[in-house]
Amino acid sequence: MVSPSVAVLLIWMAVPLAMTIYFSLIRYNLLYPGDNDFVGLENYYFFLTDEGFTAGMTNTLLLVCSVLLISVVVGVLIAVLVDTSFWGRGIVRVLLISPFFIMPTVSALVWKNLLLHPVSGVFAAVWRFFGAEPIDWFATYPMEAIILIVSWQWVPFAVLLLMTAMQSLDQEQKDAARLDGAGPVAIFWHITLPHLARPIAVVVMIETIFLLSIFAEIFTTTGGGPGYETTNLAYLIYSQALLQFDVGLASAGGLVAVLLANIAAFILIRMIGKNLTDKG
């Protein structure tokens, strides 16, 4: 019964993959349309030895690890804070998760032109209010600015999952701990945090897969620069395909990125998935 849909899905996946593999094995530059000789693994060699590859790998790892750390830490703190009853809690929860539903390009433009702009931005106004010199974030601290933008987008996702998980926390257990003299820190460390271990693992696994392909925020704000300072693998492949017109080299880079993403996903599933199964 499901064979037609499975066949369509396989074709949908197999055809682009086969074309990418084919393009990666030939000399395919849009500036020289007649020169399509077979070059074997030459494109892979040029991609892996390109000066941008090391920078792209480093920036990708830095971006993923930094956003994951911020998302988990800030997400846990916010989830614990909004778990208590207060007036307007429903509105606050909606506002907390709303950045996750904003398109990445729109979010990047808002941060670039309204918040981090060195002349007319909100941060610049705050700096001048306290007598300090405004910072040109995308020129002085470009990677930190990208991490800030992406974290602002993904913290609500962590908050949503962790906030939902907090609803299933046994309140009687916390009340019993208070009667035994446990303080807020002890309750958080020994009861709340272990209860959030599984949703934190889910947040790490899902966000890692998506953060490996961050592109719109970099394209909209820094264009991968200055130099290679904010170039990750996704933007490096884009620059080779659409800026240098080398489809063969970009196809090889795309397959390398897919391989690295699958390795990361395999490790996460083996480590985190096994952890979830054991706890289940």
Image (tube, rainbow, N blue to C red):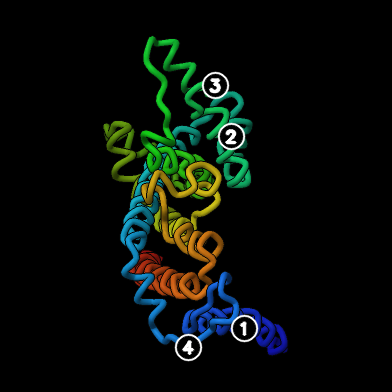
Rendered position, 64 above or below 39: above
Q: Residue 110 carries which label?
A: 2
Rendered position, 188 above or below 118: below
Q: Using the rendered image of the protein, determine whether residue 205 is visible from the camera's viewpoint.
A: no
Judged left or right of residue 1, residue 160 is left
In three-dimensional space, the C-alpha distance between marks 4 and 2, rounded to whole angstroms, equals: 45 Å
Front position among marks 3 and 4: 4
At 49% across and 16% down in the image, what residue appears? 125
Label whose residue precedes the other's in the sequence (2 or 3):
2
Crowd tier of the residue under label 3, counting other residues whose Cα lies within 10 Å: few below 14, some 14–19, many 20 or above: few
Front position among marks 2 and 3: 3
What element does badge 2 sit on? helix
Image spot of residue 84 (x, y percent): 49, 32
Crowd tier of the residue under label 1, counting other residues whose Cα lies within 10 Å: few below 14, some 14–19, many 20 or above: few
Tell me, yes or no, whether the two marked residues, 4 and 2, touch with CB atoms within 8 Å.
Answer: no
Label whose residue precedes the other's in the sequence (3 or 4):
4
In three-dimensional space, the C-alpha distance between marks 1 and 3, rounded to whole angstroms, equals: 48 Å
Residue corresponding to mark 4? 38
Rendered position, 244 above or below 203: below
In three-dimensional space, the C-alpha distance between marks 2 and 3, rounded to whole angstroms, equals: 12 Å
| Residue 252 vs residue 274, the one in the foreground | 252
Image spot of residue 79 (x, y percent): 46, 39
Residue corresponding to mark 1? 15
Judged left or right of residue 66, residue 160 is right
Tell me, yes or no, whether the two marked residues, 1 and 3, touch with CB atoms within 8 Å.
Answer: no
State which quadrant residue 76 falls in.
top left
In three-dimensional space, the C-alpha distance between marks 3 and 4, rounded to whole angstroms, equals: 53 Å
Image quarter where the N terminus lies is: bottom right
